[in-house]
Amino acid sequence: MIDQKVHDTAERLFRSKYEELTELERHVAHHITERTPISTNVVQDFSKQMTLGQKMADKVASFGGSWIFISMFMVVMVIWILLNSFILINLNSSFDPYPYILLNLVLSMLAAIQAPIILMSQNRQAYKDRLSAEHDYEVNLKAELEIIGLHEKVDSLREKQWSELISIQQEQLRLLRQLLEDLKKNQ
């Protein structure tokens, strides 16, 4: 019974057979038929499925792309260079003499570790965005179809009212003619 209703709804709203609809359109047809809401919080649902490693990667990526990280990084680099320069000037030796090869190695390792973590986080964000866009399309499609249904109902009601008004007007005209005939007879 419900399957037949879904098929009828699909044919009425999409003007094509249920079997020809996409999975998303079938989902919308089911929700319209059952009169259930289609809205969900896609980001919250996605966040519940994330592993600990994915959550940590997102936190590392958000910290690595923050002004706090950039400021701290600049301070560490300036301290490193000043400390090395101070030791070099005062003691004629330093733990990382100019051109700071050890600092370059540390920076390269940091970049090598940070880049894949940021890419993983961006991939997850892109996936969340795709889910959100797909869900937005689904909600918009349902809303559009519901509006079409409401227009059809309003048009049907308007046609019914026009028919009733015409029949009432015809009855009034008939009564007026009868009154006129009665008046002519009485004169």
Image (cartoon, grey):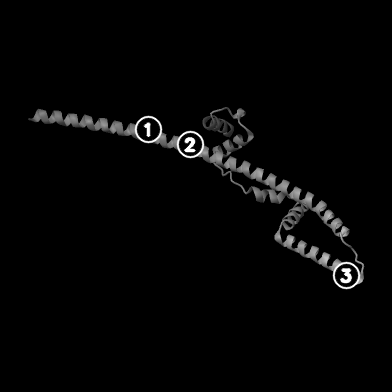
* Label 3, residues with CA under 10 Å away: few <14, some 14-19, many ≥20: few
Q: Given this view, does label 2 or label 3 mark the residue nearer the observer?
A: 3
Q: Distance from label 1 to label 3 (Cα)?
A: 96 Å
Which residue is the site of mark 2? 149
Left of 15 or right of it: where is 165? left
Q: Tag 3: residue type?
A: Ile
For image coordinates 66% across by 49% down, the residue present is 43
For image coordinates 89% across by 72% down, the residue present is 90
For image coordinates 72% across by 62% down, the residue present is 68
Q: Quadrant of the N terminus?
A: top right
Which residue is the site of mark 3? 89
Label 2 vs 3, first from the N-terminus: 3
Left of 40 or right of it: where is 103? right
Which residue is the site of mark 1? 159
Say which of 65 and 11 sits in front: 65
Contact between marks 2 and 3 (CB within 8 A): the answer is no
- Residue furthest toward the bottom? 90
Q: Distance from label 2 to label 3 (Cα)?
A: 83 Å
Q: Tag 2: residue type?
A: Gly
- Quarter occupied by residue 21: top right
